Amino acid sequence: MPGSPPPKSFALCLAGLLLATACSAEPTSAPSSAPSSSALSSSAAAPVPAAGLAEVTVTVPSNLAEAPFDQPRKALVPNGWTLSVWARMTKPRLAAWTPDGRLLISVPSTGKVVAFGADGTGETVLLDGLDQPHGLAFAGSTLYVAQSDQVDAYDYADGVATRPRTVAPGLPDAKSPDLRGAYSHALKSVVVGPDGAVYFSIGSTGNISVEDRTATPPRATIMRVPPGGGPAEPFATGVRNGTGLAVAPDGAIWIANNGRDNAPDPDGNVREEYVNENPPEQIAKLTPGRELGWPFCNPDGGPANLPFIRDMNTNADGAAMDCATLPAVEQSMGAHSAPLGMSFADLPEPYGAGALIGVHGSWNRQPPRVPEVSFYPWRDGGLGDQQTLVGGFQSEDGSRWGRPVAAVTGPDGAVYITDDYAGAIYRLAPPG
């Protein structure tokens, strides 16, 4: 592997919505499949909790009671559970527990990775001067950090990260010359498979930026670095913005993927009632060469085993991709939910093993899609339907006081939740 990367100052990702034009070529053959009429229906049922949820007042220590906790905040949690503000910080994103019991938090906006003690105190800066660090993952005592332009590995021990080396260099971000500062999905995530292979996400440039698929390296992909190092190669394609990246109990890699905006209906019309529910966000199991369709095919229906239909902007005639041949998507959540961090956990009954996903909520849907922490039960190598684990962040008028990003279980069995809108880390604790 290459030597240590030099420290780098933070570079602001200029977010923008880049719309690629529809394919202009004349049809060369008959369409391979017609868009399904089920695309006109709701993409996913409302999440149902495994156990009843109760409204509780979020517990806030007096020294952490700045806005939005300068007034009482109510949340929905499983019956008998509690939710408290465990720590405060600016724009926390993804999280990982260290082998010695510290909680690491990535802060892309400041270029830092921050560590907290097991009680939420003793905040220290583990790494600084990075380019939008986002994904965090451990393989034994090796820490992997996904920056906007590279993935690095560090030796971790006793609260110190040393011997940095670059695992995957030259990744695209807003500084890439060909992108000229325009990159909507520069933040990257990383996990390590049971065989030691490193998987990381490269998001798309924009909403339906077709050119991402032929870029070098290709964008809208999940990349894989083989065990022991080597060039990264695409593992899954057509992944618009797969920030939720996690290893399941059986060792499989799963993705929570953000779908496109402003999708036209099967007649080619952009209608609010259709856009509000389409396409569903994908929760998918990745296998070598998996194709998730973007920007030519969109998942349809749900909540589980979603087929694909043609995208009427980019693939109206079916020539760009035969959507009917793509394997169905295993699970989903409502369109524009914006799933971010994903992890697998084993929670107390009645939950058991399953996936935790931070649902950030929509940015442009009306009415807004609700932020929450979702739970998907693990069943026979797959995921059951979406359940709400923590809710109550959004009022009936659409205003919000919080937006979860990620949820991970701690050594104490509690669930720790980052919220970059409220600037908080919560502790969701089961009874006892």
Image (cartoon, helix red, strand yellow):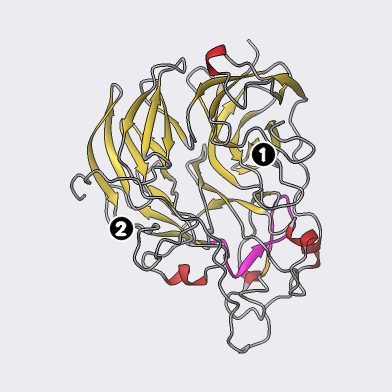
Left or right of residue 420: residue 30? right
Q: Position of residue 363 (x, y in %)?
A: 64, 49
Which residue range is magenta in the image? 291-307
Above or below, comparing residue 212 to residue 355 in the picture? below
Above or below, comparing residue 414 to residue 105 in the picture? above
Name the magenta segment's main secondary structure: loop
Q: CA distance from mark 2 to mark 1?
A: 34 Å
Q: Position of residue 19 (x, y in %)?
A: 57, 69
Q: Position of residue 9 (x, y in %)?
A: 30, 45
Mark 2, residue position: 170
Determine whether the residue tagged by mark 2 lies in a helix, strand or loop: loop
> Front-most of 86 and 321?
86
The quarter of the picture where residue 83 lies is: top right
Determine whether the residue tagged by mark 1 lies in a helix, strand or loop: loop
Q: Residue at x 63, y 10 (%)?
A: 432
Q: Amino acid at mark 1?
A: Pro
Residue furthest to the top: 432
Mark 1, residue position: 371
4 within the magenta span: no
Q: Earlier in the sequence, mark 2 or mark 1?
A: 2
Neighbor class of circle 2 (other Cα within 10 Å; few <14, some 14-19, many 20+) is few
The quarter of the picture where residue 53 lies is: top right
> Front-most of 54 and 271?
271
Q: Amino acid at mark 2?
A: Gly
